[in-house]
Image (cartoon, helix red, strand yellow):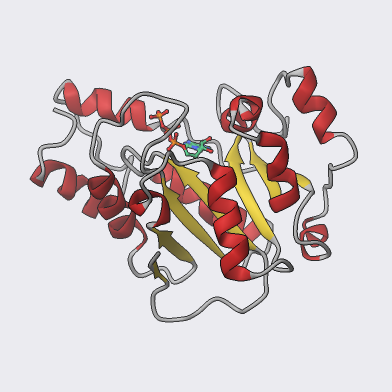
Amino acid sequence: MAVDTGAAAAPPGGPLGILGGTFDPIHLGHLRLAEEAREALALAAVRLIPAGQPPHRGTPHSTAEDRLAMARLATAGNPALEVDDGEVRADEKSYTVLTLQRLRAELGAQRPLVLILGADAFAGLPGWHRWEALFELAHIAVANRPGYAPHGRRWPATLSPALDAACRGRHSADPADLRTAPAGRIVPFDMTPLAISASLIRDLVKNGHSVRYLLPDPVLDYIAAHRLYR
Ligand code: ATP
């Protein structure tokens, strides 16, 4: 596994944010999610991990190599955002539990890891492979997302009874709690509501509309040069 860290290395030992996704393509919603989580939760850095073979959805519309390349372009020059190619390189399905186990082996048992999820992804957690094991491996930070958890509500409208039960006793409103244990807390945080999604961007491109200002210009140029999503 190779990680692009840019010029300045993250302070060793601080909580590391983990943002997985299909990133098909990466957009400003993802980047603000990473940036606002880093700031609100005092994370040392955020590691973006594009899925190779996402298990919960159909085949992505662009290749894993393209999605990785776009993530690298989007984060170039920001040493606080790392891109991890571990899931793209792996032969197996991109299960988050396996990725967190790999990161634990890499970073040690004590480093606080913070899995960053939009409210939609968090609400879908019980559909994930071995989802209850995630709480043993990382903290979870949940951001509002328009349509799922309106700004100020700090939580998806409904949680399944299984997820509700698994969350009991884990809530914390204080990001400082993320430093006192390596895993196990659930911390909601507010981000600037941005109703941007990769599906919206793919639809716009397919129909010949502009996607400028929804994603970084280098990603826009990459999509045009490689004729993606037409
Ligand atoms: P698609 O539209 O193809 O389903 P997406 O835009 O939701 O894609 P993903 O790669 O599936 O992007 O999302 C990765 C993570 O980023 C998920 O946790 C998701 O909740 C979060 N996320 C994506 N877009 C936003 C946004 N605009 N605001 C907050 N969270 C977001």
Percent of width and height locating residue 227: 10, 37
Q: Which quarter shows the C terminus? A: top left
Q: On the picture, is 56 further left or further right than 124?
A: left
Q: In this rendering, does residue 113 appear at all?
A: yes
Q: On the picture, is 159 further left or further right than 60?
A: right
> Which residue shows up at 37% across the image and 41% down it?
23
Q: On the picture, is 62 further left or further right than 191?
A: left
Question: Seen from this angle, which residue lies furthest right?
Answer: 169
Residue in the foreground of this view, choosing between 28 and 70: 70
49 over 122 or under it: above or below: below
Quadrant assignment, res 127: top right
Percent of width and height locating residue 156: 68, 26
Question: Seen from this angle, which residue lies furthest front?
Answer: 91
15 over 12 or under it: above or below: above
Q: Which quarter shows the N terminus? A: bottom left
Percent of width and height locating residue 3: 41, 67
Quadrant assignment, res 106: bottom right
Q: In this rendering, does residue 189 appear at all?
A: no
> Which residue shows up at 81% across the image and 34% down it?
167
Numbered disc total: 0
Percent of width and height locating residue 200: 34, 26
> Which residue shows up at 66% across the image and 59% down it?
113
Q: On the picture, is 96 further left or further right than 222?
A: right
201 over 74 or under it: above or below: above
Residue in the foreground of this view, choosing between 134 and 46: 134
> Which residue shows up at 84% across the image and 42% down it?
171
